[in-house]
Each structure stands twice: as structure tokens, then as C-alpha cells.
Amino acid sequence: MAGIGIICGMEAEARALGDRAYDDRISVAISGARPHLAETAARTFAGRGVGCLVSFGIAGALERGLTPGDLLVGRAVATGMVTIPLANPGANVPGRRVSLAGSDTIVPDAAAKADLARVTGAAAVDMETHRVALAARDFGIPCYAIRAVSDPADRALPASAADALGEDGRPRIGHVLLGLARRPQDLPALLSAKRDSDAGLASLRAVADDLMSALIDL
């Protein structure tokens, strides 16, 4: 294979790749949860001749019953009126095969998640897969999506966590602390969100080696 281009929204997701991130056959970009930057990175990798693109990170559950840490392998991603098929990395990569939804904005609460689930039939939503899949489609190469659930379908994002990620994919700690100073009641929800995000990242770390081995061996 000519190489693998991996797009993550957060630095923590890229770190979940472990030593694989330093393999010279693998290129990794972090979009900072900015969908347009995810697409730009994907198109850059594709233009350099990678053999496939991968969307790798956590996701918000749309389907009730999914819990933090559940591992998902995308079989398609819906964005707007378009559904783009995704490639199957093979049986050696664990995870439930599901349809994903892509969103250019944060899906903030249970009602919005329920609306998106109803419209798309997707099990989970993230902000990178649809943009990476568009680039892969245009360049005629496979796109894979590996996602771990970070928040249940009935979870709302605390207001103080909005826009808490910098373009480098790292938390804007000062921004979060300022938000907490204004809304101290958000603290329990923020702690829950951190715990559940950590569960998702642990699942990504557990699958990273199997995924990279499967794609490199194609």
C-alpha cells in the first residue's frame, strides 16, 4: 500500500494510535474538530498518493443503548442528503458495523441527537468522517472510519465545554475554566464527559494495532 492517511479531531485521539503513529507508512493529521480542516488534511494526504484514508476518534451516540467505550466501525456515513459508503477493514478489526452521521457543528443535546438519528438512521455522529469520506470518494480511494462512543444518546454537552478545543486538537483549559467560573453547575457534567471520553479513548488504543496491521497488509 502507498501509505495510510489518518485524520483525528483531537490530539488525544492521535495519541491513541500509540507507536503506530510513528510508522513511516502512516501520516496523521489533527483537525481540532474543525470539519473543513479535516477535509483539507484528507485531500492533502490523498494528493500525496496515500492508498486509503481513515477517520479515527470518538463519537457521540445517536442510538440509545450505546455506552461510552463501545467500538464502532463505519459502513457508511450520511451527510445532508448524501450517504457515502465506507470500506470494511476486515474481520480482524473488532467493533460493531454501523452507519454514521457527519455534522459540521456540535450536536448539543438529546433532542438534537434524536432528530439526527431519525433523519439519518445512524448509530453515532462525529465531525470528521463525512469530510474525510468526501475527499476519499473524489480521489477514488477507500475510506475507513473507526469510532468509539464517548457520550450516550441522552447526554447533553455542558455549555462551558462549547468551543473548548483549539485548532491544535488540545483542550483550551483557560476557556473551560472561564466557562466554569460563569457556570459552576456544569462541573459534574464536565467530569462525566471527561470520564466517558477516556473510556472511548481506551477503546481506540485497544484497537489501533489491529487496525493498522489490517490496513498495512492490504
Image (cartoon, rainbow, N blue to C red):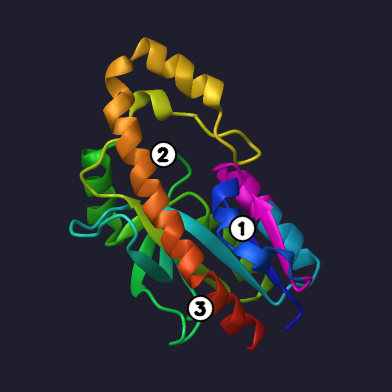
Q: Is residue 205 above or below residue 86?
A: above
Q: Which amino acid lies under the numbered mark 1 shown in the image of this protein? A: Ile
In the image, residue 213 lies at what x, y percent? 60, 82
Residue 7: which disc?
1
Q: Residue furthest top?
A: 182
Sequence-wise first label, 3 or 2: 3
Query: Could you tell me residue 97's position as x and y percent?
Result: 35, 75
Q: Is residue 79 visible?
A: no
Circle number at residue 106: 2
Point 44% across, 48% down: residue: 103
Residue type at numbered disc 2: Ile
* Callout 1: SS: strand
Q: Is residue 157 left or right of residue 214?
A: left
Residue 135 place in picture, x, y as percent: 63, 62
Total numbered badges shown on the rendered structure: 3
- Give me the disc on residue 87: 3
* Mark in front: 1 vs 2: 1
**Distance from label 1 to label 3 (Cα)?**
15 Å
Q: Is residue 75 left or right of residue 114?
A: right
- Asked if the residues shown at circle 1 and circle 3 are in contact, with their CB atoms under 8 angstroms apart, the answer is no
- Amino acid of disc 3: Ala
Q: Can see residue 155?
A: yes
30 in relation to 76, above or below: above
